[in-house]
Image: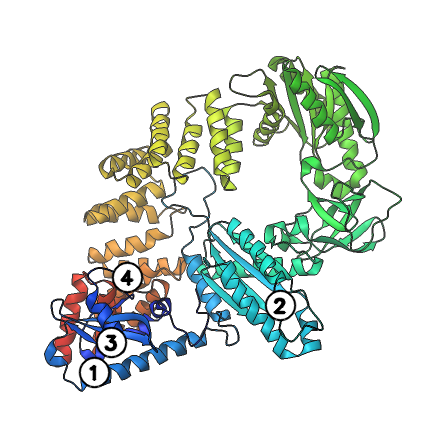
Amino acid sequence: MTPTNRHQLSYHDLTRCQEILKPPFRKALGCARIDLLSPPGPGEPNQELLQSALKNGRAVLDRGGSRLLIPLLDGLRPLGLLSAHGVSEEQLPDQVRPFLSALVETTLTLVRSRLTAQTDALTGLGNESALDEALTSAAARLTEAPPTGRLALDAENHGEGLTLLALRPRGLAGWQERHGRNLSDQVLKELARIIGEAAPQASVLARVGQTFFILLPGSADQARRAAETLQSLASRLHLKGAERDPWPVSLSLGAAHLGHRGAGPAGDTAALLKLRAGRALFAAERVGLEELLFFQEIADKAGRVQEVMPLDRVLINLGRVHGLTEGDRLAVREPGRPQEETKAEVAVSKLGAEESLAEVVRLARPASPLRPGDVLHRLPPQEASAEEPGRRQSLCLPGGEVAVTLEQATGALERRSLMAAYAALCAAGEPLAAVVLGVEDLESVAEVTGRLGAESLLAGLTDAARDAFGPEALLGRYSPEALAVLLPGASWEGALEAAQATLEKMREQGGRPVRAGVAAHPRDGFETLETLADAAKALVHAGFLEPYSVVACDAVSLNISGDASYSQGRLAEAVAEYEKALLLQADESNVLNSLGVCLGRLGQMEQAAECFRRAREVAPQDYMAHYNLGLALLRTGERQEAQACLEQSLELEPEHADTLFQLGCLSQNRGQTNRALDYLQRAAAQPECKKAVHCRLGQVLAAAGQGGEAEAAFKEAIKHTPRDAAALSGLAGLYLERGANTDIALSLARRALQQEPGAAQHMLIAARALMKLGRTQQALDMLGDALGRHPQDQRLRELAAQAEEQLAD
């Protein structure tokens, strides 16, 4: 948390500024190690010396521990202590103690100056610099987004991400104009106070102008709870001096959540999170929302009609930056009316960055024309209504009588009627087959030939399906590009045969390719209500095959569906799909592999390894099963078996870059330089190799004494990832070994430290460079700081001893 008062220091503030706090004492006392200690609690055992130093406000020598305890006080309030190791009584004549007190005051003043530079003077919260620093640091700790393509086990755990909440008081500019700056400043101060109360778990609180930011680690639910608390506290604010013109304080709130960072620098992820939170706040303000609006909710809650244009078109305030895509359908209603009272539907026809053009595709109430300010909300594809008013009928089905509406264009059931009929058939508990017929890229046809051309294609498909499936079939619109056929009492064979006949007729007619997915019930382990969705999954499967393909929902269909859920981060749904796929085909190696990867991502590594073992048994020639099992075993600490699995994977796929990389890392960690070099060089030669390969290769080449090749590898690593701290530090160390480019080596080491502050290896390299440049005191200061962070590191101790000897000489 950023301090709430610029004059009120805390122990947390000291931990943030250790690089300012420690060096003056290290230099004054001539000791290499200075530790920052928190104030002991009341009655805490074995802390008498620390409590005595804080109580008396004077340094105390701990003879048993050979350390000097220096109290850090803000007035009479204890902040913490500095523990200076290796200080003897001879170093502490009486005149030293006043000097230490003055030094404490000086360093605390420097800390205050640093905090002031990152503190908003009015509220005591962080300023934009503090916010950006906190965002970048937090983004750097996020894991990268999950991979695409065939699933492979990730070597990292995945947390819940970051949420940035942005808020502004409504109408503050007008309030300031009426009452002056003093009262508006009072509003900002009071808001800063209640923000601290509402979000005590925040990583940082900051103010930029009239906008407040709250950075919350974890899930988005924390931001929703904090927003509710903030609105409640703000509504109860009473401002002194404004009794005659009371102003009910209300807030506009926007937020953005990221579960993973991108592949680029952490600063880019931080900037994206900040940009999205700002856009959500702006959208919430623009439409006057009182609830918290997340960036991904803008299209559903903050959409408005801006302008009604000729030819049934409207300009809307949503675009690509809000997650809208061409073809998206949105319902239109009057402000203040319930969501179900839709008066029209529009479809996005020309997508812009922040504004888009949309065509009116349905008027539910022709007597209520569209007007600027009408409210929009996005419709899922399956809920988009028919484009023209339909015809009502009543169907007598095994599950009961159902009132339905037919589409004007195709004569098939519109979407809601289809689902009502489907629910009735499922309730009857009788055998049921479902077919979903999809026209390839029907939206593109609509762009070229207009709505009538696209509807003509779908009407032709409907006619062909009626002929093939017979009068007992129920046909309805499943989505804008797909038609569903419900077949009470039909079998798998009958549904497949009729679907194939429909597609053959469509092939003869020409036009856009058509595909079909089929599912039927009863089926062991599956519910009747899953039948239509399973047919749709089979249609997605057919999309990977040639035009006019018919697919019966099988294990591969469910594996594809599971992979889609996995790529969207819906891991529990993916696991359910994979497990259903295994009910159909228990020995499907791809499904076992996918389930194992998903379980590994959920932290269930032993269950993941068991899935990979089963995959290996049923497909011993599948290198991916061996590779994933090897990674899972590495995570559980079974390195010997892991290496055997990886070696088997490599035997089956000799040029698999990831397997070569993992074996190279294992060999490097075991000191097998030649083997590591062979693996990593082969990995680096593959076009799909990991970026980390080049850095590892540089390290191994340097260990093998091949300096020129190592330099090239490190440079390649930095070219791909300019902020690769290990590569920057490795190249710096290589220059130092050569005794050349020392200035460049120091610059590289400092860049590495910017990415990984306090890392022992980078501090060691930087200190060596400083010593070679004759800046021994600076090297000693850095080593002292490093030993304070890493007191057991023998390399740092030895180099510190060399520096002290060099300084003495």
Q: Could you tell me the amino acid type at mark 4?
A: Gly
Residue type (three-letter) at the residue carrying disc 3: Asn
Q: Name which of mark 4 and mark 2 comes first in the sequence.
A: 2
C-alpha separation, residue under disc 3 versus residue under disc 1 = 13 Å
Residues under labels 4 and 3: Cα distance? 48 Å
Q: Nearer the viewer, mark 1 or mark 4?
A: 1
Depth-wise, is mark 2 or mark 1 nearer the camera?
A: 2
- Characterize the local packing of mark 4: few (<14), some (14-19) or many (20 or more) Cα atoms within 10 angstroms: many
Q: Is residue 127 above or below residue 311?
A: below
Q: Are marks 4 and 3 in contact (CB under 8 Å)?
A: no
Query: Around disc 1, counting alpha carbons within 10 Å, would you say few (fewer than 14), some (14 to 19), or many (20 or more)?
Result: some
User: In the drawing, what numbered circle is on residue 238?
Assistant: 2
- The quarter of the picture where the C terminus appears is bottom left
Q: Is residue 563 left or right of residue 298?
A: left
**CA separation in Å, label 3 and label 2:** 43 Å
Q: Which residue is mark 1?
A: 97
User: Which label lies toward us, 3 or 1?
Assistant: 3
Residue for badge 3: 56
Q: Is residue 351 left or right of residue 585?
A: right
| Mark 4 element type | helix
755 up-or-down from 244: above or below: above
Q: CA distance from mark 1 to mark 4?
A: 44 Å
**CB atoms at circles 3 and 2 under 8 Å apart?**
no
Percent position (x, y) of residue 224? 56, 52
Residue receiving disc 4:
730
- In this view, the residue in front, 211 or 405, is 211
**What is the three-letter code of the residue carrying label 1?**
Arg
